[in-house]
Amino acid sequence: MRFRILAAVCLVAALATTLSCGSKGSQKEIVIGEYGSLTGGIATFGISTRNGSELAFEEINKKGGVLGKQVKLLVEDDQSKPEEAGTVVTKLINQNGVSAVLGHVASSHSLAAAPICQSNQIPMISPSSTNPRVTLVGNYIFRVCFIDPFQGAVMAKFAASTLKFKKIAILVDVRSDYSVGLQTFFRQQFRQLGGEVVIEQSYSQGDSDFRAQLTAIKAANPEAVYLPGYYTEVGTVVHQARELGITVPFLGGDGWDSPKLWEIGGPALNGCYFSNHYSTDDPSPLVQKFVADYKAKYGQTPDALAALGYDAARIMADAIARAGSTDGPKVRDKIAETKDFPGVTGSITINADRNAVKPAVILKIENGKFLLVETIKPEAVKL
Amino acid sequence: MKGWLTAAGVLGGLLLLNGLFAGALLPGVAMPPYLLQVLCLAGINITLAVSLNLINGFTGQFSIGHAGFMAIGAYASAYFTVTFGDRLRAVFEFLPEFGRDSLVLLVALSIGAVLASIAGFFVGVPSLRLRGDYLAIVTLGFGEIIRVFILNIDAVGGARGYSGIPKLANFFWIYFFAAATILVVYRIVHSSFGRTLVAIREDEIAAEAMGVHTTRAKVISFVVSSAMAGVAGGLFAHYLMYVHTNSFSFLRSFEIIIMIVIGGLGSISGSVLGAVLFISLTEGLREFAQYRMVLFSLLLIVLMIVRPQGILGHKEFVTFLTKRRRSIGAAPGTTGTG
Amino acid sequence: MTTFLQQLVNGLSLGSIYALIALGYTMVYGVLRLINFAHGDVYMVGAYVGYFLSRRLQGSEPSFVSALLVMLGSMIACGLLGILIERLAYRPVRREARLTLLITAIGVSLFIENAAQLVFGPDPKFFPSLAPSADFIVAGVRLTSEQITVIVVSFLLMLLLRFFILKTRTGKAMRAVSFSLDAARLMGISTDWIISVTFALGSALAAAAGVLIGMQIPKIDPLMGIMYGLKAFVAAVLGGIGSIPGAVLGGLLIGTSEVMVVGYLSSTYREAIAFGILILVLILRPQGLLGRVHKEKV
């Protein structure tokens, strides 16, 4: 008897908690949702992006907001798990009633959430997902960064033409669309430029022991290793590689960009290169002001994810302002028309594929600093 | 006769609710989409819990690899829909939209169920010869192996997940299959085959000595159970539109175990209760997501110490209602008053 | 050939870790017939305790002494943790059905993992350098000082354990209890105490493994215990659950085969190897390589 009552009470309590949670934004504000990985193996991506967006909306709100209303940013954590991305975006759209969505950095997560935004006609801008498939999901999905066919080609050109490497090994993260896509494009371009991929090995995001793969790579004797993964594994991989006696440089992509990379990999990373969206060495006043503001607010130098988060947020606000309303289809159209927007990551124009066409930079790691080595424009790379 | 009436009633009720929730019947009165999602996930969990209870609760075999069968059902049905769904639709053009959707879903689910039950057979035959702890670990191992193999199949997205699955599952179909699962398990348990299963649970060696084909019975219940898990997996995939092998790890298997243990291992309504409780608390405590699993695990430990048979034990909700009429062999002086 | 030898060394150092953890599983199963699912998480706690201790000791020169101190500290802390788990969670249900025990073990495991995520934060942490790093090249194979440390320390600990089990009175009592709990109690052995000692020993070894892994990899996170724990359990079963040399053999075999598969085939099959071996063993030779067949009396 007791337990029947207990069961009933539990049921009611549970249902009550479910019904009561979640809040819808009031009419006096514009609510924009952001989903990112604030915890887990790619946490710095989500945190940096969120910081960038927050800074952007803070500046905008100080100047009076958008369409006379203040902008409220709601951020949800997907714990570095792609299947959670879909769940939190559903919650943002259905329960919190956001007008638009910002996110994600990791392409796998963007791919999980994009169909939900598309079917709900909520415009989504990804600040830094570079896998081409993301914007192919539908016409409500945009990005403000370059895509991997370009990024892969950039590093291939740098490796072949500037560093004059002919034999490269590839170590790919099979758990990430980003890594798998990027290495495909790198490989294609590198071969076209006369290079050879001597061996390919793989790992999974979350692994911590790479010695078996590294030993095999060492046996193949490459001149460099292309490692298009995320910073947590990259730092560990390079650290273990040096221990195994691999002295050649490692090359990577924008997934390396994190303040934690040096903390994890340490001096093993000296002499390595990676492609990225922007460099804090850029002398333009817009960039320097952003770097200074960000440092003042968060006490850290902004990485590319923060810069892209900043740009994506500003473009979203700008589009809403131009549309004159928060209506999904109208905002979507205005985002698509974005032309020569002055971003800190370069001048942003959204092309017909809903991607941004921008130059890439090559950074070299030296004693904890990322130094700008070369800027490669889209025209310079034959795709 | 009474059976058919109840069935028709249930079906009709479900259809009505589905229309109501989707906002199709009374315009302006629609269930908040988030709540609808919670209900649907609860329905899928009910199917999973009740099907697992058949093996763990009624047959007494400790299987903790259920997520593997769910995964097979999910991926197989999703692959069918994504690859052949449109062709099937084209053949049945004369049907209305929801008819075609339902048809594709049903075919996909059947394929998922069949493949899952085949897997259940191949897992069951070697494993069910083992006892207790060993069986648990082997089923866990099989669950992981299945997950790793799916992870390596590039055609279904491999390590990146499978996206682009059309949303064919809705409230009606999810609860249709939940009800069907409950019905099937109920009928099995209340049959002579069911008594065999309970005999195996109570004392397997004695049952064997009495002439029961224990391995055969265990394998049959295993196969039936995995088929239903496959259906649940298919519904899962066609509801969330995206699946990733991460969702089918042994943590998922443990979650289902938690549901049936809380509800009561030998009780169908217990599993339903456990499933609903679990999903409600999961969603309700989403803001405190980090505390959620800590709470559940503590609850599990305390429950094992204090009341290992779970909330309902071996009883069903119905027994509480009809207690007065069922007191066969009650102590003198208490007859008729329960 | 050198690549093969190198992979072999990699496998041995990984296998030693599995062996250390497997010993805990096998000892606890021997006395209680319980699969202590939480054992892998004790290994994780050991790594974290080691992490915090070594952060404390930072500033002083990295040396073998500081590494030893960290390991001892972690072993003691986890030994106590093991005793605590046994007292609070397993003792009250000791006489219940096996299923109940198993579910309790799962509950404890989930609890420790999630509590660790709360307390330590879910992001991975990185072990600071403890002992000075040096490399040795033998026959073209590169051995890092970390790898050598892992292999040597593991073997030392295993030898110590074997000595303890075979030559001391408590060790003899442990063997008696694993043979028959009731008979041992009838003989006047304080079974509760022996069980606590078993847990303490097993947990201490797991903690040592955690610190060693931290020194080697050096990434640690709250969920690291799950996979390592499961594979170590497979190792214990492979070697023959209840047999100490079996656990060691099993650990080394699992570690080496895993490295070989990853190096020569594909890393995505990494998890499947251990479980595949487990299933083969349980079907073909359920008592494991070095185990004895238990006849069940009705």
Image: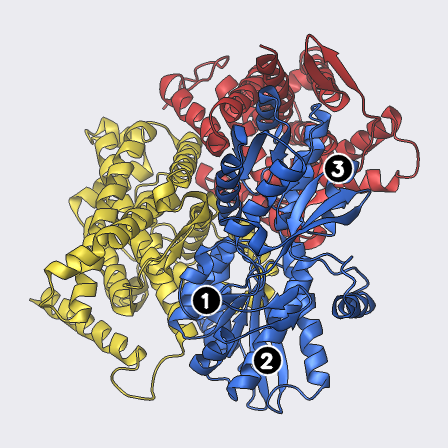
What residue is rendered at 54% in x and 51% in y? A150
Which chain comes out red in the rendered image?
C
The x and y percentages for residue B139 are: 39, 35
Question: In the image, what residue type sits under mark 1?
Answer: Ser
* Quadrant position of the C terminus of chain B in the picture: bottom left
Instruction: Evaluate whether label 2 is on the same chain as label 3.
Output: yes
Which chain comes out yellow in the rendered image?
B
Which chain comes out blue in the rendered image?
A
Residue labelled with disc 1: B280
Question: In the image, what residue type sits under mark 2?
Answer: Asp
Residue labelled with disc 2: A318
Is C94 placed above or below A75 here? above
Neighbour tally class for label 2: few under 14, some 14-19, many 20 plus, Cα within 10 Å: some
Viewer-nearest of discs 1 and 3: 3
Of residues A278 and A26, the one nearer the viewer is: A278
Q: Circle 3 — which element?
A: loop
Q: What separation in Å lies between label 1 and label 3 (alpha carbons)? A: 52 Å
Quarter of image, res B336: bottom left
Q: Chain of mark 2?
A: A
